[in-house]
Amino acid sequence: LQEVTASSRHYVDRLFDLDPQKVLQGVIDMKNAVIGNNKQKANLIVLGAVPRLLYLLQQETSSTELRTECAVVLGSLAMGTENNVKSLLDCHIIPALLQGLLSPDLKFIEACLRCLRTIFVSPVTPEDLLYTDTTVISPLMELLSRSRYTQEYICQIFSHCCKGPDHQTILFNHGAVQNIAHLLVSTSYKVRMQALKCFSVLAFENPQVSMTLVNVSVDGELLPQIFVKMLQRDKPIEMQLTSAKCLTSMCRAGAIRTDDPCIVLKTLPCLVRMCSKDRLLEERVEGAETLAYLIETDVELQRMASITDHLIVMLADYFKYPSSVSAITDIKRLDHDLKHAHELRQAAFKLYASLGANDEDIRKKIIETENMMDRIVNGLSESSIKVRLAAVRCLHSLSRSVQQLRTSFQDHAVWKPLMKVLQNAPNEILVVASSTLCNLLLEFSPSKEPILESGAIELLCSLTQSENLALRVNGIWALMNMAFQAEQKIKSDILRGLSTEQLFQLLSDSDVNVLMKTLGLLRNLLSTRPHIDYIMSTHGKQIMQAVTLILEGEHNIEVKEQTLCILANIADGTTAKELIMTNDDILQKIKYYMSHSNVKLQLAAMFCISNLIWNEEEGSQERQDKLRDMGIVDILHKLSQSSDPNLCDKAKTALQQYLA
């Protein structure tokens, strides 16, 4: 290294010469020495060339030519390795270059922008550096009108540094849409392309930007029409893909309808074309992921995509070989594709998940695709977290099918790898995996038994204690499904696993979803007489407390109705009835709800009364007398005149119990 650095030292020494002409010549020689030579770049950085170049770049006394050449050399150094970029950032190159943009000289401005572009595009540069000083954005917007180079570099900087809603808002508020729109019709392809990329990142998941774009026109043509022209088959692939992304974002934001011809006849077919195996790996990945996003929530688009160009079969190739045979002439390409093959699998799982989100026939087609279930099962244990997440999403989508739960899911014992995924996964995987488990625990699913044997109750009870709301909902929902028509032992295990404390915790959860699912669980636990009596004999006191708590709280109609239904189930028990009959507070509440203004609540309260006074059961006479003394019979007479036919019938049936 010493010899090499020694031979590079003279380049740095010349930067300190007293003769400005010699300094300029030194910088030009340095420029020629570093082009395409990473070793030389590293040497000059080690020898301290960067601070000196930055000093010369910022000196008012330096000639414009010298300052421009310094910017060019710095740009060349930035083109090297990521370490080079780090060294430049450590020397505070960004503020120096931004300062340079205030110069009147266009060539110098372009050199500064080119260098800034190279630095911002590097993965080691934090995007936020563009936004630390908000006065920077306005001058950049103004420079957009100076030359095709300023346009290309600035759009490239914006599209690279726009990550998330905060950045989108800053750029939008600084007039990005108006300033960039006219560049879409520039004579330079590079400018058109970078402007298009800007819009694709500005509009992504951003309704405000998307709604604005729909109404912007350039030379009398609206932006969506310009994007559609850029989708045509004769345009370069990156242009087709990027304009499809713009239209997709606008469609998902509600700015373009899902049945608009520009989506149905242009965007969707273009994205399906990108999935063909003649396309490059990254095009296939981006095409499939964008299409998955476009059709994710719209069943008509899902149906349309599923019958376009045999898409479902075409996606099966994503699991086979990363490159098409014709592309393998390039050994570097093959090596790259083998390293990135997991991205293809992730994209395919994502798209299958969107395709199968709603339609039973599409799910059937997906599952019948060769080795599909095996591929999903393998995907669940891949090392890449993104592939695991996408595989779980795909499984979740397919698990919405009753038919498949009974057949393919059973044949492939899908629950085993799923339970494994649930052991110690990050939250985003846990949420989807636990939703899938909810479906596998439905009463008609044959996987229910083995899942129980593998320790699911413990796992789900622990999910109900999660900080994450979606996990709490899924944990309790899965337990609710598990308790449906289950045997007594399972019900007891669930109650033991949850503990009374946790049950009260869930019943006082601030989220109504958690509350409703917990009530659903209680209702499922308290079904069939022997179970009702058994559970109320072990947990009666706590359950009655919980019911009182909810009927007294500020809750919506659905919550109160569900709670009264639980009471009706308790009233159906043989010995459990007594817990209601000896609790005057609860009896008064039932009476109150019989005269409530909401019919649903009146009906639910009526069920409780009917179960308590039913004639053929032991002790019915005493119960009838006690309720008559409370004034229940008078209310029944009133309800038998009700205008609601359901309520009227139930009241008459109840009165007959008194007459029998």
Image: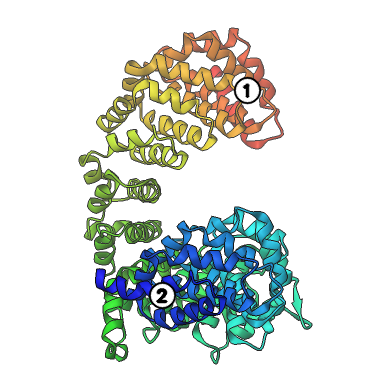
Q: Nearer the viewer, residue 173 or 595?
A: 173
Residue where numbered disc 1 is placed: 594
Lower sequence index among marks 1 and 2: 2
Left or right: 192 as drawn, with respect to 365: right
- Asked if marks 1 and 2 touch (Cβ < 8 Å), the reply is no
Residue 191 in which image quadrant: bottom right
- Residue shown at 40%/36% (left/top)? 476
Q: Is residue 474 above or below residue 322?
A: above
In x, y percent, where is residue 98? 61, 64
Left or right: 211 as drawn, with respect to 396: right
- Residue at the extreme right: 220
Q: Amino acid at mark 1?
A: Met
Task: Tell me where residue 252 appears, x and y as whole percent.
Answer: 59, 64
Q: Residue at x 53, y 65 (%)?
A: 54
Task: Please state if 178 lies on the left or on the right of 660 as rendered.
Answer: right
Label 2 residue SS: helix
